[in-house]
Image (cartoon, grey):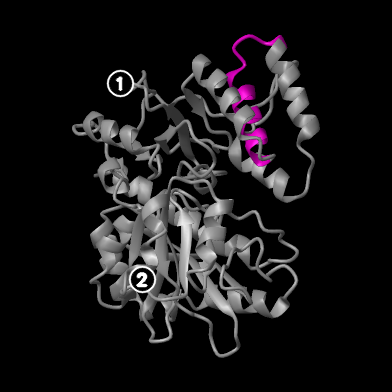
Amino acid sequence: MNPPVSQTTATAGQVPFLGVPELLRMSMKGIDLTPLGMKLIEYAKATPGAAEALLDIAVIFQLRQNAALAVGMMREALALRRVYHQPGCVPPVQLRVLALFCDGDLMANTPVQFLVEGSPVCMDLCYLTADDQALPELPPHDVLFVAVAESEANRPLLAKLTQWLADWPVPVLNTPAQIARLSRDGVYDMLRDVDGVLIPAVRRFDRTSLLSWYRDASLVFPVLVRPVDSHAGHGLEKLDDASQLAGYLATHDAAEFFLTRYVDYSRADGQFRKYRIVLMRGEPHLCHLAVSRSWMVHYLSSDMLENAANRAEEEAAMQNFREGFARRHARAFEAIYRQSGLDYVGIDCSEAPDGRLLVFEIDSNMVVHAMDPVDIFPYKPAHMQTVFTAFQNMLRHASHG
């Protein structure tokens, strides 16, 4: 029997579970989430067992960059309940999916909620902690998706999941042992010898050894340095000479860092382009193209909102992706799929001056969404729907063995 379909409305006196996609949409629209957060806090105080409200409060605190309060709210929520029904399922339910999450921040898991919204794929989210000694009681499901992302904090949990899911009775997508190989240095080791792929060497250093890295003759300037487990450019800097290292360490207190050679991937127009692509069982899908004057390209901070020419380039890239970028790098994508062994994985990449696929990062937790304003990006909704449909079809295909 299918579980009940989640509703986004609530009966009188109840507060509906909003979930990550809806709260992120509100945040991206510039809506002040403070009044909603206060309302949810008051509701949680007056309503014993209001786990869903506590989970929404945790997300709001994360969006407001208050990590300590976010962790506290999530712990309270998970003490009450481990499994949550994702809002937005459209009846009749065609497929029941269980996604396993860790109790981390928004970057700690694959944001699969965006990929099934408004579809007949019914998704339950089960939150786990590194202290768990076994899986909790789980709802019926046709497919299990491991959403726990690679990180130092998640390694113990991924190791446990490898044992717990070894003989799982339904298909498992994104096996935990393969996810655990997605560290930045692990990805380099995985792809360093792949034809058609350029991935600069990645070295891992503690603070002491980093101070002596410049004596290594194989490392040349400029280089990129970032704390281990950092994402979205946090702590990422380009060092042009050894004199900049002491200043960098003085402003970053991480215990360990990744160091890699900087590759100038700008084109003749002086701009940098970063593609976000997801592979679904080896099939590439373009999720965005960001064009920027800066070498550190992030979609939200790049010149996409203000620059119509950049948006036109992205639209053309989406329309021509199959016959253009995907065809040029087909062998590279096939190799990445084969080497990673993952059903669903994201790639942040560009094209190197010599035509190879320049890989910045491969991970399972990249955000794929359709939240950009439609009046500015009218080409996005239809294109992204094809990405979401492909994900849902992958789940259906997996459920049939």
Circle on res. 200: 2
Q: Position of residue 307 (x, y in %)?
A: 72, 75
Q: Where 336 sits versus 155, above or below?
A: below
Image coordinates for residue 276, horizontal then vertical, percent: 49, 64
Residue at 43 percent of width and 86 percent of height: 353
What residue is rendered at 52% in x and 42% in y? 113
Q: Is residue 22 above or below residue 202?
A: above
Is 279 magenta? The answer is no
Please report contact status of discs 1 and 2: CB closer than 8 Å, yes or no.
Answer: no
Residue 204 vs residue 323, the one in the foreground: 204
> In the image shown, does 126 or 355 lie closer to the viewer?
355
Secondary structure beneath dot 1 equals loop
Please tell me whether the stretch drawn in magenta is mainly helix, strand or loop: helix
Q: Which residue does the numbered mark 1 point to in the structure image? A: 134
Residue 15 appears at what percent x and percent y? Answer: 70, 22
Q: Is residue 62 on the magenta stretch? A: yes
| Residue drawn at x 53%, y 33% as measured from the top left | 86
Above or below: residue 310 compared with residue 78 = below
* Kind of residue indicated by mark 2: Pro
Q: Is residue 91 left or right of residue 10?
A: left
Q: Which residues are magenta?
A: 46-63
- Name the quarter where the C terminus is drawn: top left
Q: Quadrant of residue 220?
A: bottom left
Residue 334 lies in quadrant:
bottom left
Q: Is residue 7 above or below residue 143?
A: above
Q: How many marks?
A: 2
How many angstroms separate mark 1 from mark 2 (CA)? 39 Å
Could you say where residue 138 lies in the image, as x and y percent from the top left? 37, 22
* Mark 1: amino acid: Ala
Residue 281 visible at all: no
Compared across the picture, whether 363 is left or right of 79 comes to: left
